[in-house]
Image (cartoon, rainbow, N blue to C red):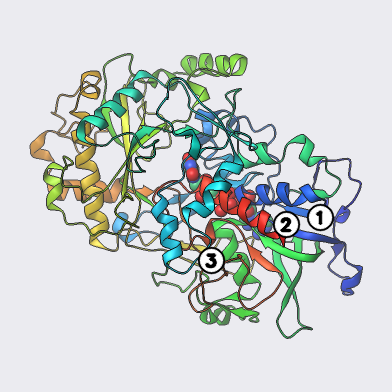
Amino acid sequence: MGNFQSKLVSDPSRVGTPSSETDKTAWRSYDYVIVGGGTAGCVLASRLSEDRGTTHLSDPRFSSNQGVLESRMPLAFPKLFFTQYDWNYETIPQSALNDRKVHWPRGKLLGGTSSINALLHHHSAPEDYDNWVKLGMTGWGYNDLLPYFRKAENYTPSASHPNVDVSLHGSSGPWHTRQADLPPVCYAIVESCEKIGIPDFNTKAGTIGAANFIEFVDQKGESDSTATAYLTPDVLSRPNLTVLVEMSTERIIFSDELAMPRAIGVELSHAAAAPRYRVAANREVIVCAGVVGTPQLLMISGIGPKSELERFNITPVSVLEAVLSRAGLATDMHQHLSPGAVVFPCKPGHSLDNLSKPIGAAVAAVRWLLTGKGPMSHTVVPGAAFFRSDNPNLPFGPGSEYLVEDLTTGPGAPDAELTWFPLVAHPSGMGMMPKGTQGITLGGILLQPKSKGSITLKSTSVWEKPVINGNYMQDETDLNFLIRIVYLQRALAQTPPLRDLLDLKGDVADVNSIFWPGDARPGTLTEEALKKWLSVNATSAWHPVGSARMGTSAKDSVVDLELRVYGVTALRICDTSVFPTQVSGHPCAPVVAIAEKLAELIKTK
Ligand SMILES: Cc1cc2nc3c(=O)[nH]c(=O)nc-3n(C[C@H](O)[C@H](O)[C@H](O)COP(=O)(O)OP(=O)(O)OC[C@H]3O[C@@H](n4cnc5c(N)ncnc54)[C@H](O)[C@@H]3O)c2cc1C
């Protein structure tokens, strides 16, 4: 479409037709209308516009990723939390988490959550996808997706990481990945992991293992979101691509003239009370609004569970019970849960805690600006160990007494992850601690929790956030997993070479100290105290998926195997909401691979 000089368009009158115009043939039209310029949306916009099909991409309010320094400086991503670039969702009070509301950050700028995330490039376990095939999703196994993981990626090997199996990585895709130079403590942790029985995970030996991550950071040391990777100046200058910003899609419009409703366009606006504009989709509307935005928009547009549509008097277009809603019920939104940050004191010179001093941060920032190197050029959570909580050879200590179920996707897949931060992280993992404190932090992720969450409409307006219920730790097995993770963290800290860098005294008796339970006095580490600590510190690990899942039947899923929404035509979904089940790792590279696969599928039809 169009001859826009501006690469990002924020004036809806230039791209749409006022909603007062009822003659659909008069609406401005595009071949594809992509709702949501997030992680998956940017991939689709870029790939679909390669062949000059017409693409229109929309993203709400806070427009460009350009000029947002914290989105380009790898270590700085937590600084975007609670800002205008974060949707700032939160759950309702969680009874098992001391009635706390849990923050759910989501990116509100081009690139979506890939513009505010921790930059970890991880495929998750092959069995996760092979399990999708077992559930009937032919064509979505690991070997089906691997070419798309590779197609997206432009990996630069590093002499300091010779174990990486490069056959699993692409070398000519748009998305730059690499390994960073990290503080020595990060390598010491990997060595200690090997000593307790968790080997390197970057090899063909499998996804159970420990390593410092490959990060989506380019050769200049800058974060590479899908916006910077896929919407380059060249792509943005394509005459057939219009990227619309500072706006929300308020609803999908369907034609009622056919036997099966057809998505014919969307309605957009700047603000709840602003004028509305319509754009028509000649071929398809593709919703990429993310795990919260997608089910919300579907329900508001008439696609969702009968009871939820009735509750808000929404005219049904397609009744699909699997769109997440159902107030108060645990449905199938998969998520990840973290026990919280366990901090261990360390000897001087081994952590990045100098960055908590303004002068230390300023020197590091200037170094990064001038050279692209130094601590600002890598993520704050650079490595992890993936393991099975039922591995009898791991030193869970007293944690072994807490029973866990096998909820993994296969014998080679992990159910838990132990992460590390080379500094003292705030208890919620998002900030720096008081001056003078030196330490390293071990985090953790329960990868396959038994408790599932739900999303419910609050109103019929996209301008009002929906109700999110994480439903965390409603099943005791989830609590038991977290207890095992904490005991494994303590065992790791006691293992050289990590132990030699730490300053452990084992005498912290105050359960409110940042060094409890990491350096706890043994007698204080009672079951009651640890469970209380977990209820106060456990939090979301930022990976909800599956709120509009793929499946073989409209009875228990929302999209078919080509990501087409059941019960309507010309409407697809492509984002983490379509994951049929949770992956036992990090979902950003998987959703990019899914978007690459869908783009090819659409282009070759
Ligand atoms: C803090 C944090 C750290 C993370 N770290 C990692 C990591 O290191 N590695 C990893 O693999 N995963 C990580 N994740 C998870 C991962 O980033 C996300 O799962 C993934 O990026 C989600 O992609 P998506 O396409 O589903 O949605 P998003 O990227 O969130 O995109 C959705 C887009 O839709 C837009 N939108 C919503 N509603 C509307 C509407 N009505 N109209 C128009 N646009 C709309 C949003 O603004 C957004 O741009 C992290 C997540 C968080 C929050």
Chain-order first, disc 1 or disc 2: 1
Quarter in which the C terminus is drawn: bottom right
Residue found at the very far bottom of the displayed protein: 259
Q: CA distance from mark 1 to mark 3?
A: 27 Å
List x then y, in percent, for residue 28: 88, 62
Reading the image, the residue beneath label 2 is: 603
Is the shortest distance between ligand 1 and the CB of mark 1 under 8 Å? no
Which residue is found at the position 43% from the left and 20% from the top? Answer: 160
SS at circle 1: loop
Type of the residue with mark 3? Ala
Q: Residue furthest left?
A: 523
Q: Is residue 277 above or below residue 202?
A: below
Spatial separation of the CA atoms under disc 2 and disc 3: 23 Å
**What kind of residue is marked 2?**
Lys
Mark 1 and mark 3 in contact? Answer it, CB < 8 Å. Answer: no
x, y percent for residue 238: 83, 43
Is residue 237 at least partly visible in the picture? Answer: yes
Callout 2 secondary element: helix
Q: Amino acid at mark 1?
A: Gly
**Is residue 274 something one can see in this rendering?**
no
Residues tagged 2 and 3 counted as in contact (Cβ below 8 A): no
Q: Earlier in the sequence, mark 2 or mark 3?
A: 3
